[in-house]
Image (cartoon, rainbow, N blue to C red):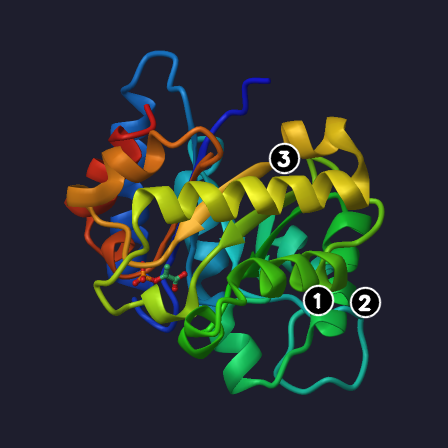
Amino acid sequence: MSRRPLVAGNWKMNMLKENGTALAAAIAEKYSAVKNPACDVLVCPPALIVSAVADKVANKIAVGTQDAHALKSGAHTGDISVEMIKDVGATYAIVGHSERRTDHFEKDADVKAKAQAIIDNGLTAVICIGETEAQRDAGKTIEVCRTQIQGSVPENATAENVVIAYEPVWAIGTGRTPTADDVEQVHAAIRAEIANKLGQKVADGMRLLYGGSVKPSNAVELMGLPDVDGALVGGASLKADDFWAIISACL
Ligand code: PEP
């Protein structure tokens, strides 16, 4: 089963309108110049500039948000609905990032409800999972990932409307990564758990991204693993040259 890789940039709480649109435009321009690119590219800016970035790169690369509310509208100060995300031209939303799980106390059930809203509105959810360092040290990496898959992924998820990002919490922003063997072992276990939940066909087609200190120097090795279908990139997605080098590992 061939899966088209996705390289996604999570800008977190970085970039203003001017430098954010310039960064996205630089990536979109390079990507547009590639004949038959073998991967998709997504950027997820802070919510306030998603509209400006989407206008700038329309029909070249995809744009998404870093969160989405589960409900359609109402008294939820500071939140954004999937309808609003769609309205400004974004087609993806990241949910369940470990920083949201930690800073905003989001649980698997919250992540699942958000992913469900994204699916219901015809967008694609990038659902993040991954173990903490303590869980890893306790030998619980695969168990944690299985539980998060069962709890965070809606029952009607398909290879088209959901992407899973495996992000070991201890690897995010630290410069540390698991070994390639470890990444492949965890991705294979995640795919098996998706097959348990959603069937082998969905599991075979679903894209599993690796995230956590992906950089130009490790991208070729990590992106070459059989069960790795692209990357979710934080820090290195803020520099056009670095992000482009990671994209190039999948082109
Ligand atoms: C992330 O925040 O999703 C991430 C993977 O960050 P970094 O690449 O900086 O580790």
**221 in relation to 50, above or below:** above
Residue beneath label 2, please?
A: 72
Q: Is the residue under label 2 in contact with that under label 1 (CB below 8 Å)?
A: yes
Marks 2 and 3 sit apart, C-alpha to C-alpha, by 26 Å
Out of 72 and 162, give the one closest to the viewer: 162
Tell me the residue at 25%/29% (across/down).
Answer: 248
Q: Residues within 10 Å of mark 1 (few under 14, many from 20)?
A: many
The answer to whether residue 85 of the structure is visible from this angle is: yes
Q: Is residue 213 above or below residue 194?
A: below
**Snapshot quadrant of residue 105:** bottom right
Q: Is there a contact, CB below 8 Å, between mark 2 and mark 3?
A: no
Q: Amino acid at mark 2?
A: Lys
Element type where label 3 sits in the image: loop
Q: CA distance from mark 1 to mark 2?
A: 6 Å
Q: Secondary structure at mark 2?
A: loop
Residue labelled with disc 3: 206
Give the image quarter of residue 154. Answer: bottom right
